[in-house]
Amino acid sequence: MPAGLRAYRLLSAAATPLAPLLLAQRLRRGKEDGARLGERRGESGVRRPTGALIWVHGASVGEILSALPLVERLRARGIRLLVTSGTVTSSDLAGQRLPPDVIHQFVPLDAPRFVRRFIEHWQPGLALFMEQDLWPNLMIEATRRGVPLILVNGRLSEASFQRWRRVPDTIANLLGRFDLCLARTPADGARFSELGAPRVVTSGNLKLDVPAPPADARALEALKRAIGGRPVVAAASTHAGEEAAIIEAHRRLRKNFPDLLTLIAPRHPDRGAGIAQLAGAAELKAAVRSFGELPDASTEVYVADTLGELGLIYRLAPVVFIGGSLIPHGGQNPIEAAKLGAVILHGPHVDNFAEIYAALDAAHGAELVSDVGRLTAAIAKLLSYPDARAHVAENARATVEAQSGALERTVQSLEPYLTQLQLTERARHA
């Protein structure tokens, strides 16, 4: 084991007594579920189901969404599933979208004692890590117990690649623990190979195969009635600094579109009240969904600060700005909006989804807006010309559909491991 990993193991073990302080601090900030803190220490009040068990791990909301179609396919094989993630929002999403017989747990803090407790309790027969969430102790303890590890929908940005190159022995040791690395794109695969992944296959982006997000029929009808025939635009999955740009764009647009309603769905719902205050400071009347409010005729900005309702937003707004892209965050997922017929606007910072944004832009299914002025102009044009808007939306839908198929390639690559897992389980009970 490289010196860097040995040092990490020692430091994380030594810091274990500080875990209660860390968890208490995170709980105060709303980043933990107080009723489930034991899971962060590798403890569980849920019994392990009998039979073969596959463990699927994703860091947060995006990774869990990517895993949903794969979870359904594995479940259809009659294999029990454990899904772990590390955020409260992803836990809420799991509660909404995972089948009831799929177990969700918070991933333990990456301390050897907690991880060992977790592995010993669940005893998975196969572990699938989504995208790039590589926790050293989690991987080390799993491989020590003989659990095959597979990286699924693997992604590695150029920036992350350059950072990992500074510690080549460490990343080579970690990636070498994967039996198989299923990369989203050839570029991702090349980076994983150069850093030491021993077996890399390009399988495509699972996010392209995720079904369009659902929408509660009653909630959708209630919002449609409240909005009436007003023109609507939306900003989805926004981050701090972007809402001010959206609000300024609204201020500039309302002269020509006096009935315009702007929907803002922040990436982190707990920021909703602050966004409403920003709108108020710009002399725009705001309503907040988490307060139980619906927009009325005088509402100009409606803050949709609730979890799991992007399906509502994309069905209501024909033009959607996808956040995380005006600031250097890397961009959020545009695929769901494209599947539901929205025209996509985005900023220049889309490294996390570079390939799909490039394909959308090239097909004239999305538009790059680098500042408030260009954002305002793009919205005005799209609202003014509905036929052109419909053409752009169709380009986006067709582009996403043409790039699907990752789910089938992923399942095909996993087939030998699934067969071995089921054969081993049968032999155990023979």
Image (cartoon, rainbow, N blue to C red):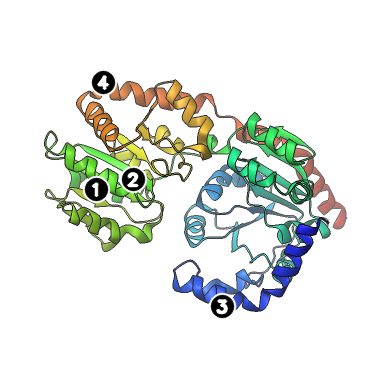
Q: Which mark is residue 312?
A: 2
Dot 3: element:
helix
Q: Residue at x 39, y 50 (%)?
A: 239
Residue situated in front as seen by the camera: 262 or 120:
262
Q: Nearer the viewer, mark 3 or mark 4?
A: 3
Q: Which quadrant of the figure contains the C terminus?
A: bottom right
Distance in Å between CA atoms under marks 4 and 2: 23 Å
Q: Going by the image, does 167 lie left or right of 361?
A: right
Task: Name the N-terminal-most of marks 4 and 1.
Answer: 1
Q: Quadrant of the N terminus?
A: bottom right
The residue that appears at 66% across and 43% down in the rendered structure is 152
| Kind of residue at badge 3 | Leu
Is 64 rendered above or below residue 229? below
Q: Which residue is mark 3?
A: 21
Residue closest to the eye, 132 or 83: 132
- Badge 2 element: helix
State the CA–CA distance, disc 3 to disc 2: 39 Å
Q: Which label belongs to residue 387?
A: 4
> Label 1 belongs to which residue?
223
- The 10 Å Cα crowd at callout 2, few under 14, some 14 to 19, many 20 or more, is many
